[in-house]
Amino acid sequence: MLAVDNLGVRYGNLTALDGVSLSVAPDEIVTVVGANGAGKSTLMRAVLGLVQINSGTISFDGQDITRLPTFKIARKGIALVPEGRGPLRQLSVRENLVLGAFSRAWDAATKADFEAVLDRFPALRPRLAQTAGTLSGGEQQMLVIGRALMSRPKLMLLDEPSLGLAPLIVAQVFATIEAVRGMGVAVVVVEQNAHAALKLADRAYVIENGRIVLEGSNLLGDKRVQEAYLGGSVA
């Protein structure tokens, strides 16, 4: 479904991504783990066209999307749940969810998806009129995942979904990610919480200093990954 080939991104003289390649199949959960500043968020933003790509290509569903503007990429079926949750804080819960369907007509199917999101996240239903910025961290994470689902994506990108959340809420978030895959949506998760992310994923990539240094389908028990998670270096 998604193919990133030899991707390079620079910020001035700083190389953020250097020859990164990865793939995601339909209905698959892929995780990208690495330390803070390794290039994980830049990779997600590059897929959405939010940063300038200096080299390499990105294709989605067999179509080259490397140079497309973000709104056209989103309309092809890619949704991003950004780091820090990022609900539009001054808008209500309802308004945030409705904005998730920006590329769709507000018809019976969209209304049904709105109700389905509220059924999946019942804590949001009594808060529809509440300002998003007043929600708890866990409720905000539910909201941004729900907002992404409102676009009816084929692929969902989640950037540090467990950041700043209590352990119980983290478990709920990762259970939700598994449920999203059960809806037929492929998922890419970038995470510093390596244990939780690797336990969830079908396949994983380890990124260091803008480069993929390890990939595989069973990295949770890999000694090199354990050393990296404890602060060492896979490379």
Image (spheres, rainbow, N blue to C red):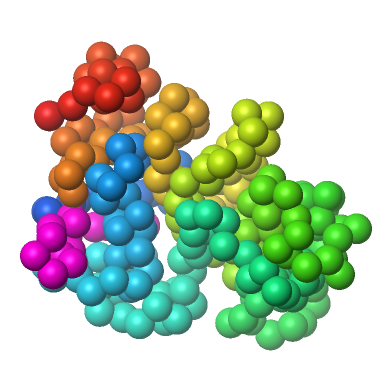
**In the rendered image, the vertical position of residue 89 relative to residue 197, given as above or below:** below
Q: Is residue 121 left or right of residue 29?
A: right
Asked if residue 3 is among those painted magenta in the image, a careful observer would answer: yes
What residue do we see at 35% from left, 82% from top? 69
What residue do we see at 32% from left, 42% from top? 36
Residue situated in front as seen by the camera: 214 or 231: 231
**In the rendered image, the vertical position of residue 134 relative to residue 207, given as above or below:** below
Residue 21 pos. (x, y %): 19, 51
Asked if residue 230 is among those painted magenta in the image, a careful observer would answer: no
Q: Is residue 65 left or right of residue 190?
A: left
Name the main secondary structure of what is drawn in magenta: strand
Extreme residue toward the bottom, this view:
105
Magenta stretch, residue numbers: 1-17
- Image quadrant in which the N terminus is located: bottom left
What residue do we see at 46% from left, 66% from top? 78
- Image quadrant in which the C terminus is located: top left
Residue 50 pos. (x, y %): 35, 72
**In the rendered image, the vertical position of residue 207 relative to residue 75, given as above or below:** above
The reply to whether residue 150 is visible in this rendering is no
Q: Quadrant of residue 204?
A: top left
Residue situated in front as seen by the camera: 54 or 180: 54
What residue do we see at 40% from left, 45% from top? 190
